[in-house]
Image (cartoon, grey):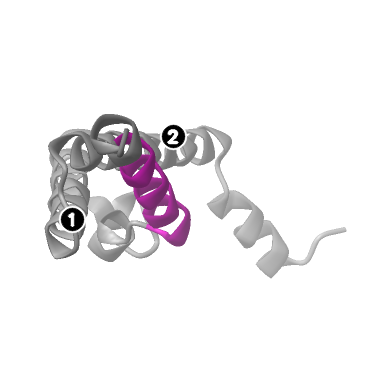
Amino acid sequence: MATPSEAIAAQLIYGPNVIANSSISTTKFLSACFAGAAAGILGLENWSGFVLFLVSTLLTAGIIHAVNCKGKPGRYFQGGVMELVNPGQDNAFTFVLAWTLFYGIVHGEQ
């Protein structure tokens, strides 16, 4: 039989919320992909490309904060606002990959 503390911990994990959080991760991933593609197509180099990534991350976090969390991200994420703003290592790598891919396709040497 489970101890009371294990029962309380089990109640904190609610299946529909886990699914909703994975869809938010997917949204952040797609935002990084599109921002990388835009940076590559626009021919941004050096810091200007990373500024686009920062703006894209903040814009995505703001939209999720306003629309999905209804202004109260602490109710939906353990880290609150910082969890929304954190792009994650995978999304940063995805941005750089898409950035270099589209930059090479559009502005590559012939």
Give the percent coordinates (x, y) of residue 22: 48, 38
Q: Amino acid at mark 1?
A: Glu
Q: Residues within 10 Å of mark 1 (few under 14, many from 20)?
A: few
How far apart are the two marked residues, 1 and 2, measured between alpha carbons? 35 Å
Q: Which residues are magenta?
A: 88-102
Give the percent coordinates (x, y) of residue 89: 44, 61
- Nearer the N terminus, badge 1 or badge 2? 2
Element marked by disc 2: helix
Q: Residues within 10 Å of mark 2 (few under 14, many from 20)?
A: few
Task: Name the disc covering residue 34, or none.
Answer: none
Count of numbered circles in the view: 2
Element marked by disc 1: loop
Give the quarter of the image for residue 106.
Answer: top left
| Residue nearer the viewer, 3 or 86 | 86
Q: Amino acid at mark 2?
A: Ala
Query: Magenta segment, principal secondary structure?
Result: helix
Quarter of the picture containing the N terminus is: bottom right
The residue under label 2 is 20
Q: Residue at 16% across / 43% down in the picture? A: 43
| Residue nearer the viewer, 60 or 41 | 41
Give the quarter of the image for residue 74.
Answer: bottom left
The residue under label 1 is 45
Quarter of the picture containing the C terminus is: top left
Question: Is 101 positioned to the left or the right of 38 in the image?
Answer: right
Q: Residue at 13% across / 45% down in the picture? A: 59
Q: Residue at 31% across / 52% down in the picture? A: 75
Give the quarter of the image for residue 84.
Answer: bottom left
**67 in the magenta segment:** no
**90 in the magenta segment:** yes
| Residue nearer the viewer, 74 or 96 | 96
Q: Residue at 21% across / 52% down in the picture? A: 53
The answer to whether residue 31 shows anywhere in this view is no
